[in-house]
Amino acid sequence: MPQETVSGTAQAAPIVVVENVTKRFGAFTALNDVNLRVGKGEKIVLCGPSGSGKSTLIRCINHIEKHDGGRIVVDGVELSHRLADINSVRCEVGMVFQSFNLFPHLTVAENCMLAPMKVRGISQAEARARALGLLRKVRIQDQADKYPAQLSGGQQQRVAIARALCMQPKIMLFDEPTSALDPEMVKEVLDTMVELAKDGMTMVCVTHEMGFAREVADRVIFMDRGCILEEADPETFFRAPRSERAKGFLNQIIH
Amino acid sequence: MFGVLFEQTADGQRYIDWLLSGLGWTLALAFFGWWIAFGIGVVVGVGRTVQNRFLAIPARLYVEIFRNIPVLVQMFLWYFVFPEVVPSALGDAIKQIPPPWASFFPALLCLGLYTASRIAEQVRAGIEALPRGQIEAANALGLSGYLTYRYVIVPQALRLIVPSLTSEVMGIYKNTSVALTIGLMELTAQARQISEATFQTFTAFGAATIIYLCLALIAYQGMMLIDKAVRIPGSAPVKLSADADLAAEVQQAGALPNALEAAK
């Protein structure tokens, strides 16, 4: 597998290490011997055709999917089924889903407060203050006491970002955060993500938003059929993709 | 036609007092039985959905046993058989319980545990109807299994099943009439007693029927109020829209009755 690490930061202080990871769903191999290092503060964009394993890869990083082979180390802790307290790892890894997955029976603020109070054990007042602070950051503080179903898709996704940030994670994973949004709402979510990137958050994003990739990514990783085919800085990747599959993929998404 | 109800009985009361006393037992049995059923039903229903086999298998067994034995047979088992199979000291103590309570407690246990098995299946169906993403989101936030159930899954599942719980509320108070077979003088038993004392069968059972019907309507209205009170703001029961998310929501809402069918 050709693996060229472009950025030096990845070696400096890897916070996520993925080594020779495989994942199968029955006869289907979703990940085939994947290697990835994410340095602190690094922004990585994962792209590739549907079914290429990019979502599976980031879902393995917080152990929502359990990998079958290889090693994943997050923030110094190796993930395995023997790991007694996976939740202490998950506290450090925020995740934003394609379908938002807000808790519909809780208000926006309560969505943001639940895990900090119950998992981190902070007081209600502190949790609310933190939630409102982060909701302000994603420019949605005036909706704090509404319920998710009363918000637009873009607003819901920004709440989902704030909810993840309320746990003060060290890494943020984004699983196609804009794919379920109406076109006019994509920008507000991407702007939030760009801001987050500028604050120095470590981010791994599965996205096909190439403008976003150009603006913030340190590396773009192209996956196909469970393998990492290419890894390059965004300029190089978009200007001169090496593999035929990446060329074909880029042609298709940049009509 | 109901005039006979206001006539004096041999013991100096009026027949209507017999009916009201019966109504009291019926309501007490249904009310306390409901909370037993609801408490156990939620726990067993959750147990049906967990990965842990040491919880899932007993929960399954519970449901299969209590749901599949006719409620009349269960009534006899608790009243006649249970005191015989427990250690004799306990059995004797049970047999010492004075008359109304000697029938009331077995009936309470019987209806509570039987209804719990039915509620458990609905709780399970409600949990299984929730989108998978809810559990994933809770996991991703670091919530433990217990916290996920406590704060994310069960509150949503219970909201989903309020309509089907309505029929369980109605079911448990209708089933209280089975308690007459073990000698509890609840509403039906009193109606029969009146009919035997006065030979006014139509009046006696007619009055009982009207009372049961009124109770059903009250229970139904009560559950409608609860349904409204716990409904999540912004989520109307059915929304029709071209929007993909809403369509998915509607589909999920539609998935519940199917799951309930499967549960039956």
Image (cartoon, coloured by chain):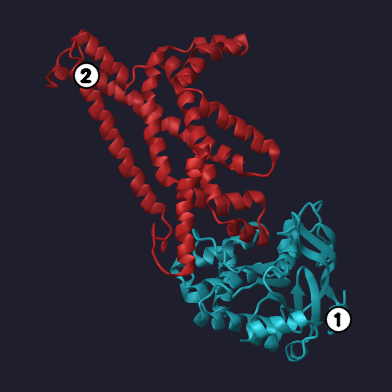
Chain colours: A cyan, B red
Local secondary structure at mark 1? loop
Q: Secondary structure at mark 2?
A: helix
Left or right: residue B171 compared with residue A10: left
Q: Could you say where residue A142 lies in the image, as x and y percent from the top left?
A: 47, 75
Q: How many residues crowd mark 1 within 10 Å: few (<14), some (14–19), many (20+)?
A: some
In-image side of A13 versus B210 (left or right): right
Write down the chain letter for disc 1. Answer: A
Estimate the x, y position of residue B224 in percent, counting from the top left. 34, 47
The residue that disc 1 covers is A5
- A141 is higher (above) or lower (below) than B35: below
Q: Vertically, is A22 above or below A209?
A: above
Q: How far apart are the two marked residues, 1 and 2, measured between alpha carbons? A: 89 Å
Q: Amino acid at mark 1?
A: Thr
**Residue B229 placement, left or right of A137:** left
Name which residue lies at 45% across and 26% down: B111
User: Same subunit under labels 1 and 2?
Assistant: no
Q: Is residue A94 in view from this perspective?
A: yes
User: Can I make out residue A125 in this image?
Assistant: no
Q: Amino acid at mark 2?
A: Ala
Q: Please report the residue visible at 21 percent of the width from the left and 20 percent of the height from the top.
A: B16
Q: Nearer the viewer, residue A29 or B145?
A: A29
Image: A23 above or below B188: below
Please identify the quarter of the rendering in which residue B221 is found: top left
Q: Which mark is residue B197?
A: none
Quarter of the picture containing the N terminus of chain B is top left
Q: Which residue does the numbered mark 2 point to in the structure image?
A: B204
